Amino acid sequence: MARQDWLGTALIVATLIMIGVAIVFAFAVAPTPQPEVGGDVQRIFYFHVGIAWVAGLALLVTSAASVLYLWRGEQRRHDIVAAASVEIGIVFGILTITSGMFWARPVWGAWWTWDPRLTTTAITLFIYVAYLMLRNTIDDPQRRARFSAVYGIVAFASVPITYFSTTWWNTLHPAPVLSAGLTPAMRSAMFPSLIAFTLMYVVLLRARIRIEHTADEITLLKQQVLSS
Amino acid sequence: MSAEMQNIVGFLIPAYAIFWLIVFVYVFSLRSRQRNLEKDLDALKRIIEKRQGGEQK
């Protein structure tokens, strides 16, 4: 088995095991939640935080890859990572909002409110959807990569604004996890899901990068066919 | 059914179900994109091999 295949398989197996562990911790190990935070519905929290963490991580990776692209002589590999990671960030951003809505409805009595955290999360999501739209409108690969890199760096400002929105403005949303005063039992139940979703992100990122590499190979061969 | 049970059936289970549905749809889309590209790649390789074979004759 090739080294890459072995690593890919190991990552998938580790992800599946950790997802299993995260489910057990969220449903069996985590303490029974108080009725004022939704009772058992609060168990959505353990996945919601993991998903939101991956959304932020994916957008951070896009921003870092964009910096590297501009700094390290515009190498295609950095543009590939930026484009691949942003797509995963958007998927996990949608999942963050969706999982949050299922907690908000029984606890707040509404699927959606224009709360600062929810609003800034939605704005961040739209900013990165626009990033993908921008990529699709520019045909020249180098120009596309350069514009996307600048956009990817500037757009990342929306992520810390979203994170700190609960401390900067009055909000219904619970405080950031790091300062939320979680009990030790809640913290230990949350970490497996953080590890599981981080592993899932790595697996998805590798698969998405592979797509870009194959597409590049096709472009190269097409040029070869046309020029011969 | 108690309010607690209604919340579990109405919100907790659907939240997890929708999460996995979206993840599976995304994984499936990655897989199908990769497969389509690999098909295109194979077709292009065949065209190039044919051309090279024709040139050698």
Image (cartoon, coloured by chain):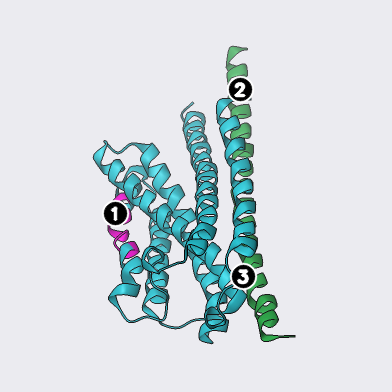
Chain colours: A cyan, B green
Which residue occupies the extreme top position in the image? Answer: B57
The image shows residue A53 at horizontal and vertical percentages of 44, 58
The image shows residue A33 at horizontal and vertical percentages of 57, 74
Residue under label 3, please give it: B15
CA–CA distance in space, label 2 to label 1: 43 Å
Amino acid at circle 1 = Ile
Q: Which mark is residue A153?
A: 1
Which one is in front, A189 or A201?
A: A189
CA–CA distance in space, label 2 to label 3: 51 Å
Residue under label 2, please give it: B49
Label 1: element kind: helix
Residue at 63% across / 41% down in the picture?
A13
- The span picked out in magenta is A149-159
Task: From the image, give the main secondary structure of the stretch colored magenta.
Answer: helix
Chain letter of mark 1 equals A
Residue at 59% across / 25% down in the picture?
A2
Q: Inspect the magenta stretch and tell me whether residue A156 lies in it.
A: yes
